[in-house]
Amino acid sequence: MKRNVILMGGKTYVLSLPHSWVKKYGIKKGEELDVEERGNQVIVSTERSSDGGEIEVDFSALNEMIGRAVGGLYKAGYDKVRVKFETKEQLQKIEETLHRTCVGFQITKQDENYVLIECLSEVLPDEFDKSLKRLFFSIESMNQDLVEAMENKDIEALKKIIEKDDQINRLADFCRRVLNKDETQIILSSGSVYYIVEQLERLGDYYKAIARRLIDRKIGFTKKDVDLFKALGEYFILLRELYYDFNLEKYELFGVRRKELLSMIPEKSDLLWYQGFILETVFEMNGILATQRL
């Protein structure tokens, strides 16, 4: 999209705002907007949230996937959703999904075969940065907790790691909702950050699965396994540092450390093949960072 610059009064340069953006955020005459200079860019933004719109869906035929379908509408950015269902079991799964992962989404009206779900809290753009940082640190914390649980052979600590996955999902779903509503002020493209959020959530799933396997096996591992998880935790910290402060020296180290860690992971292992998944999931995010930051 291009706009012509207009000179008014011999001193003031004026640029028209896109009509679609003005309409989306309800911008009025005389309203104050935030203007930020960023290199060769000038970013105009508003603290106001856009109307995510509403949708009516019939999920009567869904059972196994009804929770994921409701979660998908939340992540898509809708503010009002009317869901038709048939059974009590379907309603229970809808309620469980809202409680577990859909921040601010609540049932405001219920009939025999439908519910009206509305977003009762406004999405603020600055909450995205905080939530993404919490997501990074939550994954880092999961790895630390896993190492401590293995060292202490603590079953209860492993159970807490499993419970923490719900927190990871809530943060990831909130970030994806904000990205889909296009209300962030991020340097990387929304699609790139969306991919990173998806990968971070996947890491949470891996740690949850590892904790479950250790519980089922009543804790069976070697010191080498613990040391490798410590190294994977340090590798993830390097990824976080690259995201927030990218430089070529760290980027090169990221590749070197991957080679070293690959040589440490056993080719055949009942439990710890997850270590390879964790390593590769973390490493694969380098492509997005390189594309957007170099």
Image (cartoon, helix red, strand yellow):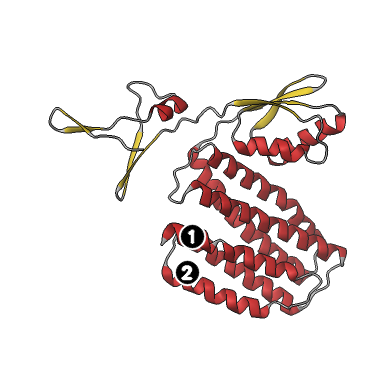
Quadrant housing residue 46: top left
Q: Position of residue 59 (x, y in %)?
A: 77, 30
Nearer the observer, 11 or 137: 11
- Circles 2, 1 touching at the beta carbon (< 8 Å): yes
Q: Residues within 10 Å of mark 2 (few under 14, many from 20)?
A: some
Q: Position of residue 276 (x, y in %)?
A: 69, 70
Residue 5: assigned label: none
Relative to residue 208, is residue 43 depicted above or below?
Answer: above
Q: Position of residue 269 (x, y in %)?
A: 79, 74
Residue type for callout 2: Tyr
Image quadrant where one finds the N terminus:
top left
Quadrant housing residue 270: bottom right
Please give the name of the residue rendered at 38% of the width and 21% of the height, measured from the top-left corner. 28
Residue type for callout 1: Leu
Q: Position of residue 156 (x, y in %)?
A: 81, 59
Nearer the observer, 45 or 221: 45
Please give the name of the residue rendered at 32% of the width and 22% of the height, measured from the top-left corner. 30
How many marks are shown on the rendered structure? 2
Which residue is labeled 1 in the image? 289
Quadrant housing residue 97: top right
